[in-house]
Image (spheres, rainbow, N blue to C red):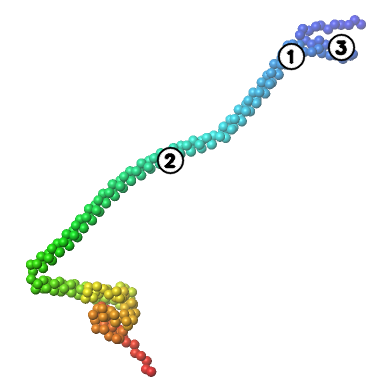
Amino acid sequence: MPSSKAPSVPNSPVASTYGGATTVAGPSAELQAVNELLSNMKNALGSLGMTFDTLGERTSHVAALAPQLEAQEQIQSLRLHIEAQDERYDDALDEVKMLLKEVMQEQLMDFMRQRVEDMIDEVFAEEVEKQVTAELETHLPQALQDQLQEHRAQLEEVQRSLRNSEARRANAILRYSNMYEPLHQLVTSAGIVSAQFPRDLAELFALDAAKAKALVTEYQLEASESREKNLNKFMQFCGVMYQMVPTLSPPP
């Protein structure tokens, strides 16, 4: 049987039969070029994908750093604001210091001026009194000077009597219900208040015999050996409307 020859196809693989099996010859140059182009495109796409992945990672990293960058910007802005506030505060403080210094200097000058004037007045008054006294001693007769001294003593006595009268009138309204209300003090003939003068009725009623006798003696009252009599004498002198009753001793 005559063999038939297959028509040749340009640029196509050549098929041959060997031992009942059909084999295909290697690819042509054009097919290899296409395969290489596809391989290169695949590699390029792979590289582009890796580039996109890297870009995505960097974008995520930048996005994660955004709050930190924003916080740093806020911190920097706050720092600048604080520095500006400090500068304004320092300026205001300097202004207050200057004003305070001026006020203190002015007040100090006023105080010193007033103090100097007071000292001058005191010295002047003392000097005038000395000069007047010297002139009186020189020009006034001794009898007239004695009379003037007597009038001064009488005036002081009247002033003491007036003060003691006002104190007695105030003490007269004190009652047992207000035992701790202050007792109005009376002065001695020397014009002073005794250091042992009781502060209130409670302290007055609690005076012992020695203090009661010391008080009537200091105020030039008639003293007794009886505590009750001395207290009654002193209370009468002070205007207190109470009297102490002597305690009777029980019969033996």
Q: Residue at x 34, y 90 (%)?
A: 248
Q: Secondary structure at mark 3?
A: strand
Q: Measured from the top left, where is residue 189 in percent x and y?
A: 21, 76
Q: Residue at x 43, y 40 (%)?
A: 82
Q: Which residue is mark 2?
A: 82
Of the pair 23 and 159, the residue shown nearer to us:
159
Label 1 is placed on what type of residue?
Answer: Gln
Give the number of the mark in front: 3 or 2. 2
Q: Which residue is mark 1?
A: 32
Residue placed farthest to the top in the image?
A: 2
Q: Is residue 162 visible?
A: no
Locate residue 250 relative to residue 59 in the image: left or right: left
Q: For mark 1, does the 10 Å Cα neighbourhood hold few (<14), some (14 to 19), or many (20 or more) residues?
A: few
Q: Which residue is mark 3?
A: 17
Q: Residue at x 66, y 23 (%)?
A: 47
Q: Secondary structure at mark 2?
A: helix
Q: Is residue 60 visible?
A: yes
Q: Measured from the top left, where is residue 176 in percent x and y?
A: 32, 78
Label 2 is placed on what type of residue?
Answer: Ile
